Image: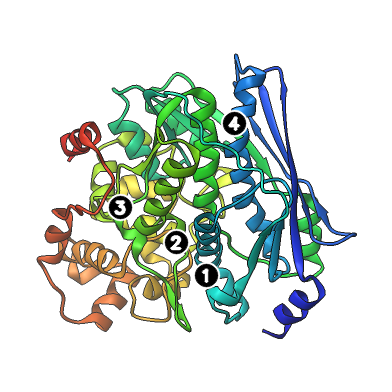
């Protein structure tokens, strides 16, 4: 806590100074300028590829989404000092917009607060002042009924790719990795749209010097990058792969429900969706097609796409090296949630080993099942879903030769609910933003 107060005093404001848009061939580059002090200036760039036939007039209209994209890009740089004032020099925000951004920053940085031991309330977090009251008008362009599907390379986006492959849809990848590109190809799509984002090296150097660092709401950033991509390419639907399980938090800090997946929650989806329609484009339809489902149901659907077993990756540690680290909470969670549906031989081919036999994963295993500590700060399922998967595997296994982790669970947990697994598989959450056609598409895949 002492550190953040010292930084807020030393750096009382951060300035969103400007953004610049340039088209070079088919690459549209948007560069930002954030000023923390005379000596600390950030200039990150986001590049959009395949931007054909963009006129100067169209680029002028797109400045609205690029300005707003800068607001969510700012959060990665803001967190280094958590200045109590954000000054905007290149556009105006009304009071509703200011409230939206304060809520997104505050809740999106929940894990950051928790890990850094920061206790602060939303009212005192920061204020926003706009030096320039330029208001960028919403985009009134009529968009086509086609979709873009953000793809990360994990099992969830694979399911979305597969269930939408016979519709007018195109994958979108931010910072492609081998697994995301393979997922697209394996699902039968001929090409994808891509964008690239890089962290300014100045921030990385500040992290090394001991300024504040931690998790930011990447899915919210992806939302605004996806919206820009959709508008550039004239597409109406932004189809996410966020499941209902993302609504469960990890821990409590004061009055804050800390959720690693906050920007994947239904609450955040609705906030972003409404913001898009009011301030960006009333045509945009931002929603998750997997929202009605839980992790168990998604895993059961994924298990039917055997052609993806060798190609997908849900490991954040090894993803860029195109491997499963087989040691992190995300690897173990993915192993657990798939294990009731995929045979042991295929599971070993996917992960390289039987993770239920790995004694070094015991602490992580009991955190995931809710029997010890807090839920790991990863995109994982709920305690109920994870326990149901574990108990199902125990039920169908040889009780005299259970793997180490399952044996330990059986000893500690004792009684189980044998009907829980089947009950969860039948769940369908009506709190979602699916409309007509997409409801039918999802229902037909269940």
Which labelled disc corresponds to residue 338? 3
Label whose residue precedes the other's in the sequence (2 or 3):
2
Q: Quadrant of residue 412?
A: bottom left
Where in the figure is residue 334, as x and y percent of width and height? 38, 55
Q: SS class of the residue under badge 1?
A: helix
Q: What residue do we see at 67% from left, 20% from top?
A: 56
Q: SS class of the residue under badge 4?
A: helix
Label whose residue precedes the other's in the sequence (1 or 2):
1
Q: Nearer the viewer, residue 55 or 349?
A: 55
The answer to the question of whether label 2 and label 3 lie on touching residues, with beta carbons closer than 8 A, is no
The answer to the question of whether label 4 and label 3 lie on touching residues, with beta carbons closer than 8 A, is no
Task: Count neighbours of disc 2 (C-alpha within 10 A) and say few if under 14, some if 14 to 19, many if 20 or more.
Answer: many
* 74 shown above or below 228: below
Which residue does the numbered mark 4 point to in the structure image?
A: 62
The answer to the question of whether label 4 and label 2 lie on touching residues, with beta carbons closer than 8 A, is no
Q: Does residue 241 appear left or right of residue 67 in this picture?
A: left
Which residue does the numbered mark 2 point to in the structure image?
A: 262
Label whose residue precedes the other's in the sequence (4 or 2):
4
Which residue does the numbered mark 1 point to in the structure image?
A: 110
Q: How far apart are marks 2 and 3 (CA)?
A: 24 Å
């Amino acid at each position: 806590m002492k550190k953040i107060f010292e930084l807020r005093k030393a750096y009382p404001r951060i300035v969103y100074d400007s953004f610049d848009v340039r088209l070079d061939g088919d690459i549209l580059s948007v560069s930002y300028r954030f000023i923390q002090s005379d000596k600390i200036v950030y200039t990150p760039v986001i590049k959009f590829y395949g931007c054909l036939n963009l006129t100067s007039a169209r680029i002028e209209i797109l400045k609205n989404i690029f300005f707003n994209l800068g607001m969510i890009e700012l959060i990665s740089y803001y967190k280094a000092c958590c200045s109590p004032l954000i000054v905007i020099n290149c556009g105006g925000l009304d009071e509703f917009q200011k409230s939206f951004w304060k809520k997104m920053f505050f809740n999106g940085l929940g894990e950051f607060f928790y890990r850094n031991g920061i206790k602060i309330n939303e009212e005192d977090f920061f204020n926003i002042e706009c030096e320039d009251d330029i208001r960028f008008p919403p985009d009134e362009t009529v968009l086509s009924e086609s979709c873009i599907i953000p793809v990360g390379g994990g099992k969830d986006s694979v399911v979305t790719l597969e269930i939408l492959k016979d519709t007018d849809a195109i994958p979108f990848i931010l910072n492609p990795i081998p697994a995301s590109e393979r997922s697209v190809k394996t699902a039968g799509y001929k090409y994808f749209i891509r964008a690239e984002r890089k962290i300014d090296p100045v921030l990385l150097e500040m992290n090394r010097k001991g300024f504040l660092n931690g998790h930011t709401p990447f899915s919210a950033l992806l939302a605004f990058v996806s919206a820009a991509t959709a508008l550039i390419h004239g597409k109406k639907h932004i189809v996410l792969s966020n499941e209902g399980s993302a609504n469960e938090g990890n821990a409590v800090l004061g009055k804050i429900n800390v959720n690693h997946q906050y920007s994947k929650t239904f609450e955040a989806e609705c906030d972003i969706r409404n913001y898009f329609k009011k301030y960006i484009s009333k045509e945009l339809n931002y929603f998750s097609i997997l929202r009605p489902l839980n992790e168990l149901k998604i895993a059961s659907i994924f298990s039917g796409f055997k052609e993806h077993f060798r190609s997908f990756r849900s490991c954040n540690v090894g993803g860029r090296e195109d491997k499963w680290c087989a040691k992190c909470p995300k690897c173990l969670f993915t192993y657990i949630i798939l294990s009731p549906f995929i045979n042991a031989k295929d599971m070993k081919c996917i992960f390289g080993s039987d993770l239920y036999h790995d004694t070094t994963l015991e602490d992580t295993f009991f955190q995931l099942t809710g029997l010890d500590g807090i839920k790991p700060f990863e995109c994982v399922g709920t305690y109920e879903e994870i326990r149901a998967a574990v108990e199902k595997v125990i039920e169908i296994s040889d009780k005299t030769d259970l793997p180490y982790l399952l044996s330990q669970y059986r000893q500690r947990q004792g009684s189980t609910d044998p009907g829980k697994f089947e009950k969860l598989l039948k769940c369908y959450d009506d709190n979602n933003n699916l409309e007509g056609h997409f409801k039918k598409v999802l229902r037909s895949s269940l």
